[in-house]
Amino acid sequence: MLAFHPVILFIAFISGVWLAALQGQGGSIRGTLRFCLLPSGIVIVVHSVFFNVGSTPLFAIGGKPIMLEAITYGITMSLALIVLFVWFLSYNQTMTAERFLCMAAPLLPQVALVTMISLRFVPLLKERLHQLVLIQKLRGLDVYDGSMVKRAKAGAQLLHALFSWSLQEALETADSMKARGYGVTKRSTYISWSMTRQDWLVLVYMIVTGGGGAWCWLIGGHGQTAYERMIRVGWTIAEWGSIVLLVLFLCIPLVIELKERWQWHCWK
């Protein structure tokens, strides 16, 4: 329930957008928000129409009551989905493949490799799809022009070429890594990272704020529920404590980014 609290979600959304903007991802933010509009709308509509749980009917569609609680929960789920996508923008910008492998490969090399490949699979497919679309246009096959049958045939050929290319590339990568002995012994890295004093301080800060916020919530900060009826209980000290600690937890990357920008400005 903590992850679906509207105050936490709103703060997480604002901090995530701010962080992504500081990292120069304004265009990606706009594209992500446009991408999330349709799935969010579908979640809200489906949850409002098919889940008639609650005690506050607003109106009826085809004899089925539409409950305020169902709409509220659908909006909350949509906001949680948007927050997840927004924060992954900063994750992709910060956590490079080398950093991820340096952290996870010494313990679980196979799992680390599969995870890294999965995370880069969608961007790689998008890049290859863009290249194939340009090539198909030169051949006179356009998925955006012509009749429905013509566009369907062009799309089928495009998908066939895309998956064939991806599978062939995956087989070549697997053979190459097997020949190099990946996973046989402990993996080394080209770049050596070590924990600095600042890293340890940030880690302790994250444990204290994140763990303290979750603990405050568990001991009595359940201040809002959606099912089965919309209620609002007075804000307790535990709930205030959980909100403040989790806000401090979410501000960590913002503070680090602003500090580095200030240092860069001073050094210039």
Image (cartoon, helix red, strand yellow):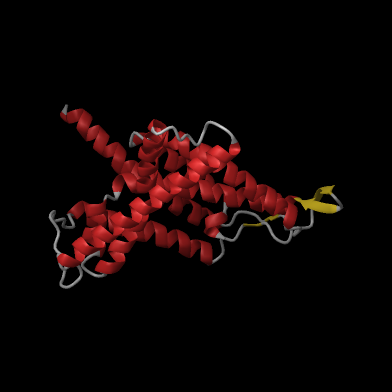
At x 68% / y 57%, what residue is drawn? 226
Q: Position of residue 164 (x, y in %)?
A: 37, 53
The location of residue 79, given as percent across then percent down, is 56, 47
Q: How many labels does the image show?
A: 0
Say which of 203 and 42 sits in front. 42
Image check: 87 left or right of 61?
A: left
> Outermost residue, top direction?
268
Establish if 263 lies above or below 204. Answer: above
Looking at the image, the residue that sits furthest to the bottom is 184
Q: In this view, does 177 lie above or below 61?
A: below
State which quarter of the image contains the C terminus: top left
Locate residue 231 relative to residue 105 in the image: left or right. Answer: right
> Which residue is nearer to you in this view: 170 or 249?
170
Residue 172, visible in the rendered structure? yes
Q: Which residue is drawn at 63% across and 50% down?
A: 43
The front one of 164 and 182 is 164
Give the quarter of the figure containing the N terminus: bottom right
Q: Position of residue 135 (x, y in %)?
A: 36, 36
Q: Residue at x 79, y 57 (%)?
A: 55
State the image quarter where residue 190 is shown.
Answer: bottom left
* Residue in front for this viewpoint, 242 or 84: 84
Residue in view at x 54 percent, y 42 percent: 152
24 lies above or below 127: above
137 vs 236, left or right, is left
What is the residue that sits farthest to the right in this orientation?
63
The image quadrant that residue 235 belongs to is bottom right
